[in-house]
Image: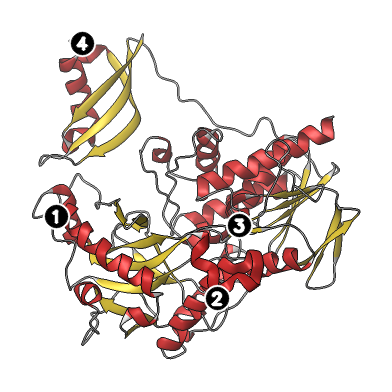
Amino acid sequence: MQQEFQLQVKPEIAQNQEQLKLYVAKKNRLNANDINHLEILKRSIDARQKNVKINLRVRVFIKEDFKEQEIDLKHYNDVSKAKEVIVIGAGPAGLFAALKLIEKGLKPIILERGKNVRERRRDLVAITKDHLVNEDSNYCFGEGGAGTYSDGKLYTRSKKRGDVNQILELLILHGANKNIAIDAHPHIGTNKLPKIIEAIRETIINYGGKILFNSRVTDILIKNNEVYGIQTQNGDIINSKKIILATGHSARDVFELLHKKGIHIEAKPFALGVRVEHSQNLIDQIQYHCDVRGDYLPPAPYSIVKQVKNRGVYSFCMCPGGVIAPCATAPGEVVTNGWSPSKRDQSTSNSGIVVELKLGDFAAYQKFGPLAGVEFQKQIEQSAWHMAGETQKVPAQRLVDFTRGKISNNIPKTSYQPGTTSVELGSVLPKFIYQTLQKGFLQFDRSMKGYLTNEAVVHAPESRTSSPVRIPRDKKTLEHVQIKGLYPCGEGAGYAGGIISAAIDGQKCAEQISLVYKS
């Protein structure tokens, strides 16, 4: 017999299978010797009270043997001679679109402008140490997309859009820890993601798909408002009447190409702000109401949302036990992001703190049409580069000084390896963003007492939260509203906001293409 129970237990009990079994037995008047197996189905942390508890949903096997279900690729067959579908971009949307195409009996041809994960690392080192940005291979571009080096946060609110569990199962099949299917806020870790991405690549190739690296698409070939192929920077032409466009939120050249060709795109609101670094110990103390975090609790995250004059100010991509990374995609700009290793064992935590933008905020850039948001974003990133001495150093300010508009006399060493330059960040950010953040931080401190400290450091800008462009598509067919056979997909097209939602969107586009071929 199997039974499921909802529990709230101490962290040390949640971490010990034998103690948990005894607790379940006592709580539910069961004989502990009759419990053959206890499976944790869901796990979350409740830190609202002084004594932190762990919420669990468990399945108990009473006088019944447990057999672990195996995840496999039984629905996959060789597609090497099947109909071909071009997938532009090897980020989460592109890779999971490719897996779904194979499942549906179609051959994906993935074109990735950057390098594979192993070769890509050299270019990340070049940004950090030499301040050199490769426009095709960086933290945003390359195998796995931006997700590979932004630590694999898998939390999503997109459960109504598709099968989240299927995405998690595929990640587990390719090497992710099984806990991602259990934890309320699952996370893989930047150190673990590359091998998982490589395993997905091998699956795609082994079943007949194709991946071409260093293959930046420079033209989408169209006749009579229907795609028939693409051209790469090398002059190569690949023909297909179905193209999934999954280029990510930073592919500005693609947005410019579409606009130049008269393909309808539109400006989209996004969010922009800064990345703030605290000591992890401080965040633990605030969130867990303790002097020292216990051995049975993970480094504490935080999530906070406030309103300042009808604008949202909120944390974004919070990285417990993590570091801040340089994420520019072109020379002459500075961009920040954050990531954590799988153990989240760094001494610092960081989070994007961003301000909600509206289309009216781009009024000064209206001459750029649908690219107004892109130009707004560019101007701030380029301003940061100039203020930091035209290097990949980042303009920075101590947090209390930021709220007071005061230049910091010095900046403590932070996890951002290229280094920092002390700057009054009102000279980098537009006035309304700067002032909104100043007031937002004061509100943050009321909810998280101790958050506002001059030991915390503000780095600017955090500007790549989502795409500043939407590529409109038909709600039913998912094809572009104007161009037949073109399927805008994922974050870059404005239809996703993270690894899971992008992967789901990739699968949805692949499924629509398979339906067209079956009809």
Is mark 4 in CB contact (under 8 Å) with mark 2? no
Q: What residue type is labelled 1?
A: Gln
Left or right, residue 352 beside residue 298: right
1 or 3: tag closer to the N-terminus: 1
Residue 439 image position (x, y, % from top left): 25, 64
Q: Which labelled disc corresponds to residue 167?
A: none
Regarding mark 3 in the picture, which secondary structure is present there? helix
Mark toward the viewer: 1 or 3: 3
Residue placed most toward the observer, 155 or 209: 155
4 or 2: tag closer to the N-terminus: 4
Q: Which amino acid does label 2 sit on?
A: Asp
Q: Which labelled disc corresponds to residue 30?
A: 4
Mark toward the viewer: 4 or 2: 2
1 or 2: tag closer to the N-terminus: 2
Residue 448 quadrant: bottom left
Residue 151 image position (x, y, % from top left): 43, 57
Whole-Å distance between the Cαs marked 2 and 3? 22 Å
**Residue at which label 2 appears:** 123
Q: Which labelled disc corresponds to residue 492?
A: 3
Q: In which quarter of the image is the N terminus?
A: top left
Regarding mark 4 in the picture, which secondary structure is present there? loop
Whole-Å distance between the Cαs marked 4 and 2? 58 Å
**Residue at which label 1 appears:** 285
Whole-Å distance between the Cαs marked 1 and 2? 37 Å
Regarding mark 1 in the picture, which secondary structure is present there? helix
